[in-house]
Amino acid sequence: MSETEQHDAEQGTVFAPKFDSSGLLSAVAVDVETREVLMVAFMDSEALAKTRASGLAHFHSRSRGRLWLKGESSGNVMKVEEIRIDCDQDALVLLVRPAGPACHTGERSCFYRRLDGDQLEHLTD
């Protein structure tokens, strides 16, 4: 990438996401009101396009190898209010309004434990 192209990607206004060698971007879902980190997932170009078109968070499920609408089975969809992209355009933050728990375990966030020494401790509200 030339200096001009790098400058345009980092400082310009053109949206040009950089997918990794597997065709994925990291996507962090954050509650638009509380700013709590709810989950981290991956998006391919199809998931990003579906998210932008529908306003609902779509991801690429690496385990299923397919497009995944968050909440397609649970109903716990995430309405995307804003998409932010990092400086080199290889990661996204989705500011979302969740319709229920983000985690498949039923927890509000996938980040419901903290590391305490060598043990995991369940967080309480």
Image: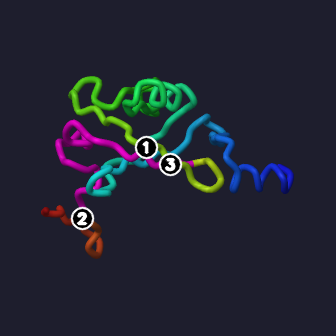
Task: Give the residue at mark 3.
Answer: 84
- Which of the 4 image quadrants contains residue 11? bottom right
Across and down, in percent, residue 123 comes to 18, 63
Measured Cα–Cα span from mark 2 to mark 1? 32 Å
Task: Give the residue at mark 1.
Answer: 82
- Under tag 1, what secondary structure? strand
Boundaries of the magenta span: 91-113
Horizontal relation, residue 3 to residue 97: left or right: right
What residue type is disc 3 on? Answer: Arg
Task: Give the residue at mark 2.
Answer: 120
Horizontal relation, residue 120 to residue 90: left or right: left
- Under tag 3, what secondary structure? strand
- Under tag 2, what secondary structure? strand
Name the magenta segment's main secondary structure. Answer: loop
Quadrant location, the C terminus: bottom left
Across and down, in percent, residue 56 comes to 37, 30
